[in-house]
Amino acid sequence: MQQLLKQLRMVPISQLASKVYRRLAKEGGAWFEAMKDKRVCTYAETYPFPEIPPIVSMPEGETLFTHALSIKALADNHSQSIFTILDSGWVKMSIPGKDHHARLKDAVSSSNYPESARILDVLLSSPYVMKQGSDRMQYHPIDWQYDCKSGYHWDAMSHYSEIGYGTKRGSDIKVPWELGRFTHAPGLACAAVLSMSHYSEIGYGTKRGSDIKVPWELGRFTHAPGLACAAVLSEQEESPMRSKEFYAHVFRTQVLDFIAFNPPRFGVQWKSSMDCGLRIMNMLIAFDLFRSIGIVWDEEFTFIFRRSLHEHALHIMQHLEWSPTNRGNHYLANLAGMLIALRGLPLSDEHCAMIRFAIAETAAEVQQQFLPDGLNFEASLPYHGFSSEMISIILAVSTSFTVDERQRICTSPIHYSSLSASIQPATPSEFKKVLHDIKHHVHKAYEGMMQVLIDDIHLPNIGDNDSGYCLRITPNGSWVDATEAPKTYINLNPRYELPDVDSMYPPQKADEPYEWIIDSLDYRTSLGLMCGALQMQPPEFLLRNGAIEYQIMSSIIQSEHTPLNSSLLPIPFSESYPRIYTYSGFGISCIKQERYTAIMRAGSTGQKGKGGHAHNDQLSFVLSVRGEEFLGDPGTFWYTASPLMRNIGRSVTMHSTLIIPGKEQNTWIEGHGDVLFWMKPDQAKADGMFNDTVWRGIHHAYGEPHMRSMICSPLVIKGHDTCAVEMRKIVQFHCVPGIEASQERAGTVQLTSPLGNTITLNSLSGFAWEILPAVYSRAYGRVEESIIIRMEVDAKTQDIHWEIKI
């Protein structure tokens, strides 16, 4: 109740009455639903499903072969229920013991037990014979309710409406949700392809190991040392070469394990409709990828799987994360997950009505959640990437419907009332117009993301970054020796502690020789996915990372994608510099000179004032030089697991701007749970823009305006901060991990990157620089050491001048 009252304090008076009413209605409805669900079997009563063609097909063998060793090494661990979840490092998620039915009795209600037990029996009677010498059952049951970092365990018998989070110190509900999204499942199908002795088995016409005439051939890339580590992993005694039937067996077992031990609407995995949508999306894509390479699923599994598609779609439809004022990416995930689940089901009148609803709602939501400049409204670039994936998948799935199917969808006699949309398509021509509107926003989102990449690979870490994605088969990351990893990634050090959390080190840490460190800010896979949905040829820099996702989307649409060969692509002529892009709706400006890229932030807190994923980053900037990031945004760290680190991560002290000690640009109410995703009304009222190559920004958070100007010439950035508040002031710059600093004079600091590039920071106001240790988070749950370069000035000084020489 205390947390609810804190939330209500941040709601505008004009919205308070309606919000209280909706909250009471929701709580009352959930209570009645829980009472009913506890007395009945919650598995759906459905009829046998007709045969439905796969909605996706496997990418070309050459595309997969680029990442073969990492795909196989990751799949090998996943097949043993060993996962790395939100930078946990490898963790054993399996449950010991062989008496699975006894465990099931303690995990599901008596009403659900008979059907759960039947599903478990189907699991234990796998039709797939493994290769000689391997365990035929290969069943490593997963604890789906477990937070592997804190050791906290949610109750599988609790109705989803009774599940709480954020109250147990250190526990993080995102951890079991992340595992329950099944994002690893499509990788199992890709590993099955790579286990084949001949690619001709899947119709690609070339043997593995033959001369692959593509520009991204494995031996040409600097990722080879990392893949060599993966080779070691794949050659361990516990990791023999697997057959495609083995991976099919693992997928079948994990899916049935989930369905048996997570009956609809019970346990932590049904708490978030968003995660239900992402889960069923990855499950269906993996299910059909296996079918596309010749796996014929048995009848019992097929029925249970199709029924689960239906159950997930119904659950999402009945528990949409929509509100008149505060909806965001969760609602987009609801629509995307529901739509792709329904694509794997027959077009009944009910399903057609839900599809029509989802497509119309998406067309309305892209108008609300994507700004006129093309970027997302949540004041976070990683969330822009995440939401862009969602609407791209919706576009691809919607485009895949034939004219006859569109006619049936538009004329379904069942109708679901719109929430955001003013009208639902009633004819195929109206359906086509809705798709055109969605495609327009996907294209603008794609262009925006392309223009703000800091180095043609990474999105800047501006705003929250929870490492979320919809579909990512390409293994973006690196293998790091497990004995060396804790020295760089200190969250993997068992002695690492937080002030408000005793330990974040997993109790069931797996003894693996190499850790897999995900590069969560590499958005080439998202861009490839968007290109596939838009049916456009991806740029050359996506040929290695992004090609798999591109081909997956192309196969959903059933479009003939152009073979990914750089010889078919035009050689781009160098553009003149500088190139300047301004996104006034989001509040960022970008200048690209020949030697550097700088991105400045000055704008709203996002989400129409809620500020759920915004940081106090006004007038801060990030900087890359010759493709290497020097100055960055230190990121998010955690959400509910550590309220202290959550608030530190979004505080002004963690950004490259002017600080007045003791003041925040925007404030929040201290607490845990949902209050960690609110800010009080925007007091900064920041704005910024370029005039030629001079950027000027202003915010009003400190009582007197803080103004920053940056003159961005080809080799020098000259900065000027001014603020009339008579208090001590600090100008600081956060360096990304790996940057080294040396100081020859008090007013000069030289920064050196891992590749040997250098920049020089000069104080032009007579004040000295300090070099201080700091922490940085490039992915959710990750902590690395870094440094801050800062200059402190006295209360009387209003103007502070500095420069960066490139």
Image (tube, helix red, strand yellow):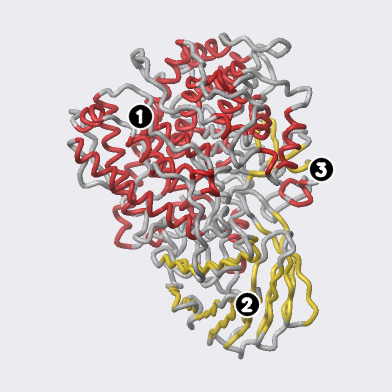
Residue 342 rendering spot, x and y as whole percentages: 35, 28
Q: Is residue 23 left or right of residue 434?
A: right
Badge 2 vs badge 3, beta-carbon distance below 8 Å: no
**Is the residue 280 above or below the residue 458 in the image?**
above
Q: Residue furthest bottom?
A: 796
Image height check: is 165 above or below 710?
A: above
Q: Which residue is mark 1?
A: 314
Marks 2/1 in contact by CB < 8 Å: the verdict is: no
Which of discs 2 and 1 lies nearer the camera? The answer is 2
Mark toward the viewer: 1 or 3: 3
Secondary element at tag 3? loop
Vertical position of residue 343 compared to residue 684: above or below:
above
Q: Residue at x 78, y 42 (%)?
A: 481
Is residue 712 visible from the viewing direction of this image?
yes
Position of 531 with respect to 174 (left or right) is: left
Amino acid at dot 2 = Val
- Distance between the Cα atoms at labels 2 and 1? 53 Å
Q: Is residue 666 visible?
A: no
Q: Classify mark 2: residues with Cα within 10 Å, few (<14), some (14-19) or many (20+).
A: many
**SS class, disc 2:** strand
Residue 753, quarter of picture: bottom right
> Which numbered disc flags the more N-terminal residue, 2 or 3?
3
- Where residue 592 appears, as percent x and y from the top left, is 53, 67
Q: Earlier in the sequence, mark 1 or mark 3?
A: 1
**Which numbered circle lies on residue 256?**
none
- In the picture of the structure, the residue carrying the numbered disc 3 is 483
The mark nearer the N terminus, 2 or 1, is 1
Residue placed most toward the observer, 694 or 15: 694
Mark 1: which amino acid? Leu
